[in-house]
Image (tube, rainbow, N blue to C red):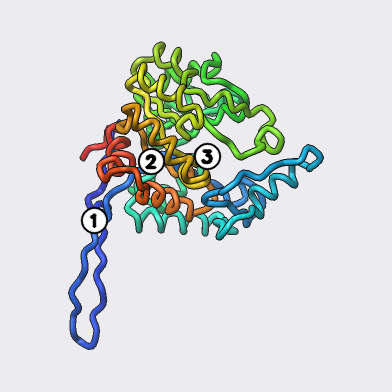
Amino acid sequence: MKTKLSCSSIIFTACLSTLLGLTTPCTFAQVEPIIDMHLHALHANELGPPPLSLCAPFPIWPVKDTHEDAAAYFARVQIKPTCDSPLRSPLTDDELMRRTIEILRARNVVAVTAGDLDMVEKWKQAGGDHILPATPFDPESGKPTVDELRQLVKGKRVFAFSEVSSQYEGISVTDPRMEPYFALAEELDVPVGIHMGPGPPGAPYVMAPNYRMRLSSLLLLEDVLVRHPKLRVWAMHAGWPLADDAIAALYAHPQLYVDVGIISYAFPRKQFYDYVQRLIDAGFENRIMFGSDEMVWPDAESAAIDTIQNAPSLTAGQKRDILYNNAARFLRLKP
Ligand SMILES: [Zn+2]
């Protein structure tokens, strides 16, 4: 599937004021384009009653005493975490959408935007070319059905299937219930983004009893990729922290990509840079894509971009590859 980036979105022009009849020179700042493979269009209360807070990053993960109630632990992680200047979530759906789209515009971002179709279409209406609509499939409920997804793709209402969050249901990518969806995506050449990596700390005790960290291994994708050699899959959250498995899978399956997801802004910074560097040192700087995993904290979009742009160990070329070039190739965007 192909799409075009509008020219107007490529160059951001800052033109300063006219004062007392004297026109001050305009300054033209070119903001290089960014593709975010991992934005969510959620309701403001989808992760719990707002406002929620999030550390960007968490310097140390909170420890849970076995006597502590799971909800109380969650509150310490996601309602009132301990860190300097946590991000704060907006109170309403409209504010969440408006502030996020403002950042997309200001930072020249086109985002693969995932969620329930009604939300994604609302964001598309508000965000125009900045939004590439995506919706997931759920192998547990069987919704949407394969036929429904086929119609959505043919009607150009859906550009990708993401974020497939079967890991939270304890369902591996090898589960037979995934198979009809993979076959459809391969047939229609639709990119599929699958959550393979961390959930919130304590996820199995708080919000997803069947979540299992071991389903983060990118080696689980092997049989799927071999069975569907034309399938375009990207692993969201890059299979963190199983770098050996990620490197092995990226090596043997040269069509596989990853996005950096939440590890880019919420995880201890040195760990994130080390993880990305391991993939780069192994020869895969051309398959790491930027993905913010912005959920209900609009400023997370900027925090994630800044983490890449300020990375001390990445070259300018590697930053452009991660922020734009790799995703443009994967999505088959026209220049
Ligand atoms: Zn996500």
Q: Which of the image's four quarters has the N terminus?
A: top left
Q: Position of residue 296 (x, y in %)?
A: 54, 50
Element under disc 3: loop
Residue 139 can be seen, yes or no? yes
Q: Which of marks 1 and 2 is nearer the N terminus?
A: 1
Does residue 317 appear left or right of residue 280 in this picture? left
Q: Which of marks 2 and 3 is nearer the N terminus?
A: 3
Instruction: Tell me the tag on residue 156.
Output: none
**Which residue matches tag 1?**
11
Badge 1 vs badge 2, beta-carbon distance below 8 Å: no
Residue type at mark 2: give it: Phe
Mark 2 is surrounded, within 10 Å at the Cα level, by few (under 14), some (14 to 19) or many (20 or more) other residues, namely many
Q: Which of marks 3 and 1 is nearer the N terminus?
A: 1
Relative to 249, residue 59 above or below = below
Relative to 267, residue 224 above or below = above
Residue type at mark 3: give it: Asp
> In which image quadrant can residue 289 be found?
top left
Q: Position of residue 126 (x, y in %)?
A: 41, 53
Residue at mark 1 to residue at mark 2: CA–CA distance: 20 Å
Residue at 40% in and 36% down: 276
Element under disc 2: loop
Badge 2 vs badge 3, beta-carbon distance below 8 Å: no
Residue 133 can be seen, yes or no? no
Instruction: Tell me the tag on residue 116.
Output: 3
Residue at 76% in and 41% down: 65
**Front in this rendered view, residue 119 or 75:** 75
Q: Which of the image's four quarters has the C terminus?
A: top left
Residue at 61% in and 25% down: 141
